[in-house]
Amino acid sequence: MMQSRTHTCGELRMEHVGMKVKLVGWMENVREVGQNFAFVILRDFYGTTQVVIEDSELMALVKSLNKESTISVEGTVRERDSKNPKIPTGDIEVSPEKIEVLGRCRYNELPFQINRSREADESLRLKYRYLDLRNPDVKKNIVLRCQVVAALRAAMIEEGFLEITTPILTASSPEGARDYLVPSRKHPGHFYALPQAPQQFKQLLMTSGFDRYFQIAPCFRDEDARGDRSPGEFYQLDMEMAFADQEDVFAVLEKVLPPIFAKYGTYNVASSAPFRRIPYLESMETYGTDKPDLRNDLVLQNVSEVLWKCGLPGCPEETGTVYAIVVPDFAGTRKQIDKLCADVEVQSGKKPYWFRLDEKGELVGGITKLVAPVKDEVVQALNLQPGCFVGIAANTSKGQAQKTAGVLRTKLGDLCPSHVDKERYEFCWIVDFPMYEIGEESGELEFCHNPFSMPNGGLEVLQKAAAGEIDPLSITAFQYDLVCNGVELSSGAVRNHDPEIMIEAFQLVRLGEEDVKAKFPAMYNAFCYGAPPHAGIAPGVDRMVMLLCGAETIREVIPFPMNKNAQDVMMGAPGLVLPQQLQELNIAVTKTEEE
């Protein structure tokens, strides 16, 4: 209901002076100047307008109200004596003839000041999210999200994709994360699962003869929170293309995303097509991560042959791996270097090392004593010049050395801003991911990314691995990640649409044909009726918006986010339910959190 307002609180200008208007909104602030004189700031979704009280009756009404009460104001627009150039309505004010209370705020004290809610404790912000969202700075992230989703939808339709919604209640399947399960009342002991992604459904759409599908899809995963991942649910731009390969998928997103990032982003420069394609192994070797921030011009250099024999801590053997990162003209202080090393150790689990080449060309600081015996070799290998700083990551595990070096590279970029062009969005594709890996917990061969991906080499390479002719860990897949500014926006793949290849791929991870038929009956059977080659991807909407507005956490761009413990403290979820409800679902609770 609009309350028959004539204008919004962000609309009035000098051309409206003398006009009779009616505004509605929240009473943000009251500043009393005299007994019957006060300035009231009225705020709605669109902005703020100053209302000047000069009447004893209206003054009494305003004084009886708490801040954040909703009111309507009828009056005349006039020019302000003291203008405020910081706000769009700063040239005018409204002299009221009538004020009506629409919704009274019944609390004298608010949990936090609305326009400073971001300074409040996050638990308070989430509990009173409806108040937090009244803050224009918080609200604008949600507005941006709406604009981005609308732009994505329009761009995908323009590219010939159909928006098709897929089921929310489905079957549990092993897709890498824990399912949220929903008990069935009509089928005791049986459960639905909320979809971790519409993966199987979108592939089934391809087998059904649809050529291009997309949706802004809700996904549900029982995962722990991170700064760039919300627990519980998230949204993604889910898409799939029939009779398509990897490059077809790339071409669509390289056309869709850059204009949206350039238009709505904090920075107005975004990579143009084609984005860089970086093989996974090259990315790990050059940047120490499969999510490289290409705005950072620092790179890793493998100096194992030169430095392994120096007796570096963590790398005592010839089999160790040593990476160096050279920063020319480094100006950091010893205190900054110590903090840098401490931060890297916390994040990567291993301590980095360092030394410098001073202006006289002498080694100083850090592990200088260990490096000194091979100084000439090191200087030549790294092409060091006076003033260079060298960060070192060393470990008998190559993967751990890469991880430490990757974190070190990022932290050095933060410390040396001249090496990072932050005012842009830099995209890249990470390609040729390993098909398999050794599971950290199981110690056995497992799928590395998506079990539905097509291996490079098809059936033949899988059969060779099964016969022991090649190492399964050497098999790569048509899997790819889209990365922007060091944030993984999405994973995608060319799908394994051939039942024979699918069976062979699963047998390597100890799942036979009957297991595949049992776990993925619809997809397996559909593929047996002649499936087209197809490929897809699903960039995360929440992560995109987080990048666009420069938010520090993903919770800043979600209207009603959960906290880090996957709780909705505003609604009290998850919560206990009545015994009758459990009985109706044939469920017995053996333990509750309160116990």
Image (spheres, helix red, strand yellow):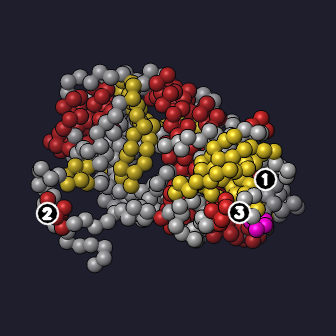
Q: Residue furthest bottom?
A: 595
Quadrant of res 494:
top left
Disc 2 target residue: 583
Quadrant of res 181:
bottom left
Q: How many neighbours does mark 2 have within 10 angstroms: few (below 14), some (14-19), or many (20 or more)?
A: few
User: Considering the numbered disc 1 on the image, is that residue within a helix, a strand or a loop?
Assistant: loop
Q: Picture coordinates of residue 184 (x, y %)?
A: 17, 52
Nearest the viewer among 9 and 583 is 9
Disc 3 target residue: 56
As measured in the structure, the alpha-carbon distance from the residue carrying label 2 to the one carrying label 1 is: 69 Å
Which label lies toward us, 3 or 2?
3
Q: Which residues are magenta?
A: 31-35
Q: Amino acid at mark 2?
A: Gln
Q: Is residue 162 left or right of residue 171?
A: right
The residue that appears at 49% across and 22% down in the rendered structure is: 158
As measured in the structure, the alpha-carbon distance from the residue carrying label 3 to the one carrying label 1 is: 70 Å
The residue that appears at 67% across and 61% down in the rendered structure is: 57
Q: Is residue 418 left or right of residue 223?
A: right
Q: Is residue 81 left or right of residue 153?
A: right
Q: Picture coordinates of residue 445 (x, y %)?
A: 32, 51
Q: Picture coordinates of residue 552 (x, y %)?
A: 59, 56
Which label lies toward us, 2 or 1?
2
Residue 590 visible, this orientation: yes
Q: Amino acid at mark 1?
A: Pro
Nearest the viewer among 264 and 65 is 65
User: Considering the numbered disc 2 on the image, is that residue within a helix, a strand or a loop?
Assistant: helix
First reached walking from the N terminus: tag 2 or tag 1: 1
Disc 1 target residue: 328
